[in-house]
Amino acid sequence: MKITISGFYDEISSSLDRQIEAIKGYGERYLCPRVIDGKNIADYTADQFEKTVKPRLLKNGIRFSSIGSPIGKIAVDDDVSYRKQLDQLAELIAIARSMDCRYIRIFSFFMPEGENPAVYRDVVMRKMRGFLDVAKDSGVMLLHENEKKIYGDTPERCLDLYKTLGDRNFALIYDASNYIQCGVDAWEAYEMVKDYVVYYHVKDCDRLTGVEVPLGTGDGYYERLFDDLAARNFEGFATLEPHTAKYAKYRKLLYFVPFAAFFRKEWFGAFRRTDRKLGYSPFRSITVKDVFDLQYAALRDYLKRAENERGF
């Protein structure tokens, strides 16, 4: 097994300098860019990126594991945004090639609320093929993330995308938390899609409430996951995308502000269970960086344990 740690370090700060500082502080060198200096990576042209971003990355020895783009994170019937995203994807591919980055994260369109996704299947497949046409012969793979409320938010529909598109430049990302938020058992989802997954997002979720919680305190089966990846001798990236800033920002408010917990019962329940698992007092102050540190350490522990178990 050879798993390399990366991260959405914009969850610490939107400032690229702060992100680089955090990466180097952890002793890592890979970034999954999403927001750079307050601007989404998809809003940079390749020329702008070359002039304002790349030199700072090269100076600090920072590389890209994948590009965390918002491509496909639009309504399925929003043709104006779709046409714009085709142009953005072309620029992102140029950025990826400039950084010797093999992967770009994409999505499969938000479904109208309350409607059966099957109604939109043909539209989804046509538009996804449009993305793949842009990436053709580029050497860059498009990786589908199982985001909630999009067409591919369940393992069944992720497999439908993979098998129907049948493109060598298309594969799956596995995100346990997103599956949990869709009411899917994370391990059952993993068993269904693992043969088609080349990239892992690492974030955890409380099954009872659907609230994202620090890694190891939810129901993502991470110890079991990394043991299985070690057994399969997986080589690739594990990218921290914890989405737990609200735990750092709001847990004390829910404990101590009258009636706050009543209006956010699911947050309060999840945060209280998390504090108990971590042994944290309600009075303990925690910053966003503290929570990211906690999850980075947990990921390192999972990887070390799996490697020791398999004798790597």
Image (cartoon, rainbow, N blue to C red):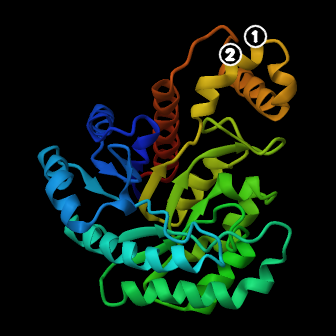
Q: Is residue 25 above or below residue 46?
A: above
Which amino acid lies under the numbered mark 1 shown in the image of this protein?
Phe
Q: Quadrant of residue 261?
A: top right
In the picture as drawn, the residue positioned furthest to the top comes out as: 283
Mark yes or no: residue 42 visible. yes
Rendered residue at 24%/72% (across/down): 97
Q: Position of residue 90 (x, y in %)?
A: 34, 78
Question: Which residue corresponds to the image point at 79% horizontal and 85% vertical from the top-left?
Answer: 119
Residue 242 picture location, percent across and down: 55, 42
Q: In this rendering, does residue 66 appear at all?
A: no
Labels 1 & 2 near each other (Cβ < 8 A): yes
Name the residue that disc number 2 marks: 252
**Left or right placement of residue 213 versus residue 156 in this view:** left
What count of labels does the image hold? 2
Say which element carries label 2: helix
Q: Specify the quadrant that holds the N terminus.
A: bottom left
Q: Amino acid at mark 2?
A: Lys
104 shown above or below 227: below
Name the residue beneath numbered marker 1: 256
Q: Is residue 181 above or below residue 258?
A: below
Report x, y in % for residue 213.
66, 37
